């Protein structure tokens, strides 16, 4: 197998050469931030299409401030590095890019030391969850972290202990995924996904003050709902019991994409199969990320820069 190439502090190196000292601050204390970005195969051209990579790096740039950190490059430069990384690895199928910025001091002591390391990895990644028939979710006994404990909007490494506890508990209890409530007992999100429900023909999602990550897929879903499906979208606090009476529920995120939820806490949602709004959004999303939609072309960067096929001119007159 080919050795993966990774990017560390300004250099591309073979992955086994990218050693991190055992005393690294980020390893012990979770003092880092990260992102997850997907590149989707466009099977008409064989190109890989990075989806909303600039927005991911812009979010990372903002989140760095929470931990007194600075990204070493501008978001547009980081998009170029992500493309270069995928090309150097020669990937030709759906790929997941993981940038990380962490405190790299090797001293014992819990403050926010100045030393930082920025790295980026790319791994092939197909579906994260098998979502064809819809998934079963359970409300977690673990609460989402409060903003003044570890801000969930920060995508901070250490905060993912909370996600891991919830996700593992869900699987141990026989669910596919967790739904996590915030400190007030309102619905926040999935372990590492945002949550939507459909009630009375409106799309509803917890607002950005409910202890959520302000997801880029969440924003994409809201945009597609408004533009392609002409649906109203409400960002507001969501109560637990709304999950039980909703006509549709789904989770969304870069890794999971759009995952229909067909059972919550053993209660069937919307007839126990993916609902029409969820399926329509899945289709719109798939068209968009695979480069088959005319909407928001600026959200896509072609990694290998292969030209899109020219569509045949419209037929005129009768044939034959
Ligand atoms: N919430 C959490 C806690 C996450 O980790 C993620 C994945 N990044 C999401 C939501 C979805 O965010 P995005 O659509 O930006 O991937």
Image: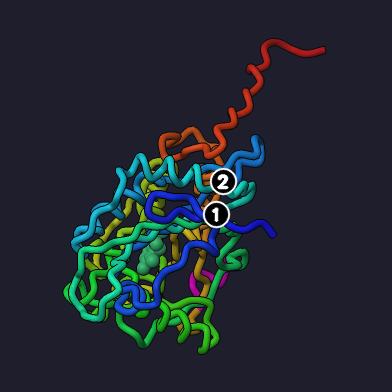
Residue at 25% across, 58% down: 63
Q: Magenta stretch containing residue 269, yes or no?
A: yes
**Residue 85: where, in percent of width, then height?**
51, 47
Q: Is residue 16 left or right of residue 246?
A: right
Q: Going 52% across and 72% down the picture, which residue do you hit?
A: 262
**SS at mark 1 in the image:** strand
Q: Residue at x 36, y 40 (%)?
A: 77
Magenta span covers which residues? 268-274
Q: Nearer the viewer, residue 216 or 225?
A: 216
Rendered-image quarter of ligand 1: bottom left
Q: Residue furthest right?
A: 320
Q: Is residue 116 left or right of residue 121?
A: left
**Residues packed near mark 1 inside 10 Å, few (<14), some (14 to 19) or many (20 plus):** many
Q: Quadrant of the N terminus?
A: bottom right
Within-10-Å neighbours for mark 2: few <14, some 14–19, many 20+: few
Question: Residues under labels 1 and 2: Cα distance?
Answer: 7 Å
- Please identify the quadrant where the C terminus is shown: top right
Q: Secondary structure at mark 2?
A: helix
Front-most of residues 198 and 14 = 14
Q: Which residue is mark 1?
A: 5
Q: Which residue is mark 2?
A: 88
The image shows residue 34 at horizontal and vertical percentages of 36, 62
Horizontal and vertical percent for residue 58? 30, 48
- Tell me which colouring the rendered structure shows: rainbow
- Seen at 52% across and 53% down, the residue is 282
Depth order, front residue of 309/98: 98
Marks 1,2: beta carbons within 8 A? yes
Q: Is residue 54 magenta?
A: no
């Amino acid at each position: 197998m080919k050795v993966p190439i990774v990017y560390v502090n300004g250099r591309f190196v073979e992955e086994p050469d990218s050693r991190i000292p055992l005393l690294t601050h980020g390893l012990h204390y979770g003092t880092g931030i990260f992102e997850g970005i997907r590149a989707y195969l466009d099977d008409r051209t064989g190109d890989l299409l990075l989806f909303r990579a600039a927005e991911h790096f812009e979010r990372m740039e903002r989140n760095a401030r929470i931990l007194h950190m600075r990204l070493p490059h501008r978001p547009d430069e980081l998009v170029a590095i992500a493309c270069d990384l995928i090309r150097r690895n020669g990937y030709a199928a759906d790929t997941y890019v993981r940038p990380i910025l962490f405190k790299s001091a090797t001293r014992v002591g819990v403050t926010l030391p100045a030393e930082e390391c920025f790295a980026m990895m790319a791994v092939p990644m197909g579906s994260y969850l098998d979502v064809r028939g819809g998934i079963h979710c359970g409300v977690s006994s673990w609460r989402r972290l409060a903003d003044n404990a570890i801000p969930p909007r920060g995508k901070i490494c250490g905060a993912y202990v909370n996600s891991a506890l919830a996700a593992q508990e869900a699987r141990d209890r026989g669910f596919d995924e967790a739904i996590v409530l915030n400190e007030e007992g309102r619905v926040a999100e999935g372990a590492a996904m945002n949550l939507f429900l459909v009630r009375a023909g409106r799309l509803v999602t917890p607002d950005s003050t409910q202890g959520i990550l302000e997801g880029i897929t969440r924003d994409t879903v809201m945009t597609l709902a408004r533009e392609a499906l002409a649906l109203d979208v409400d960002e507001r606090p969501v109560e637990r019991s709304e999950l039980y009476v909703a006509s549709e529920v789904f989770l969304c995120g870069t890794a999971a994409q759009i995952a229909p939820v067909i059972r919550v806490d053993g209660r069937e949602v919307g007839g126990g199969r993916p609902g029409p709004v969820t399926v329509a959004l899945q289709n719109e999303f798939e068209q968009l990320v695979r480069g088959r939609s005319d909407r928001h072309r600026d959200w896509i960067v072609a990694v290998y820069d292969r030209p899109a096929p020219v569509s045949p001119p419209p037929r005129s007159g009768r044939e034959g």
